[in-house]
Amino acid sequence: MDYFKKYPIQKDRMIDSFLEMIAIDSVSGHEASYRDYLLAKFNELGFSGIEDDAGSRLNGDSGNLLFKLPGTINRSPLLLSAHMDTVVPGHGIQGELVQFDGHQIIRSAGETILAGDDKAGVAALLEAIRVIIENGFDYPPLEILFTVSEEQGLLGIKNFDFSQVRSSLGYVLDSGGDPGTIVVQSPCQNEIEYRVRGIAAHAGMNPEEGRNAIQMMAQALAKMPCGRIDPDTTCNFGIIEGGLARNIVAPFCRVKGEARSLERSKLDQLTAKLVQVFTEEVTAQGGQPEVDVVLLYPEAALQADEEVVRLAVQAAEKIGVTARLESTGGGSDASIINGAGIRCANLGIGMKKVHTVDEYIEVEDLIADAAWIISIIREAVM
Ligand SMILES: [Zn+2]
């Protein structure tokens, strides 16, 4: 790969920053030290950040952090985003640089995750901005957003005030897949909680006076769709709990489930059916059904010929990386950003085995991530 010939990315500096970043604990809700680190690094480049109030709203120690770079040239602004938080085990992370399969990789030296999710994205953004500033490249107004609590159901971005942002195009650096992967389609998802209220009674003395909520729930679940519904649509029951004791007719039962689809109409149809079957079954058995449906995130569908996709494809080609348009089964900050009316693609950054202690990333992918961002910014000012 000739990323260095194209753009003077400083490989050692980038590796050092990445190792420095992952050594700062930033488990969801505790991103303050990492926020301070990023504030300092961007201050060195001459940019000050704005922190919002998502921290206090979420009972965390940091809000989302937004840097607004004015740009050297009058073009449409661009939003670039990655998340600051990590999953557990994420305390005291030490990265090590090793050879693996003929490649230089960075992996966790201990019994923790690596936090390449999403610090590879953050490190790539920082290196890209450094290279652009140092080399006097032109850039459009940039809005660089680092979010909190992404790993807790996109809570940070859900609490972000989008009125601060002017961009109509954006990129989130937070997908699996090699650099060049552009996620153009992602599902919408409903969280669905089903509750059955029955009647308690002694299980041995007078069971006929009770109404067993667990059995009513079981009978309803048996008639409800579950698993893969069609190529775009799935649903699941994930948690069940209920009852009080072995010898009490169970007075309540609760199931937490979900439904998701690439298409909103299919999600709506499936959700309506789940609610209807559940309600009818429980009612028919003399129980009291209750259902809560919460839309966790909206769907995103980008077209291959629209600007946000074209820019990323052209930028990848210019650095010799093959662009691949992909669909995913999960949500990300990009889902919420799209929902806010900003056309936004989630980009693959090469992180591997994320959310496990075997997580790693190839150094070459880290460098490619930075090169890709620089290339996107260069395409945006063409
Ligand atoms: Zn992530």
Image (cartoon, rainbow, N blue to C red):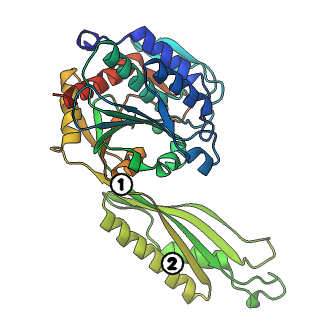
Amino acid carrying mark 2 in the image: Phe
Tell me the number on the disc at residue 339: 1
256 or 119: nearer the eye?
A: 119
Estimate the spatial distance between the alpha carbons at disc 2 and disc 1, rounded to whole Å: 30 Å
228 or 364: nearer the eye?
A: 364
The residue identified by callout 2 is: 278
Q: Position of residue 87 (x, y in %)?
A: 57, 37
Amino acid carrying mark 1 in the image: Gly
Crowd band around label 2 with a 10 angstrom C-alpha radius: few (<14), some (14–19), many (20+): many
With respect to residue 217, does 172 lie above or below?
above
With respect to residue 354, does 15 lie above or below?
above
Kindly tell me whether residue 176 is visible in this rendering.
no
Q: What residue lies at 47% left-to-right and 47% top-to-bottom?
A: 157
Q: What residue lies at 51% left-to-right and 78% top-to-bottom?
A: 278
Residue 362 placement, left or right of 278 = left
Circle 2 SS class: helix
Q: Position of residue 269 (x, y in %)?
A: 35, 72
Q: Is mark 1 within 8 Å of ligand 1?
A: no
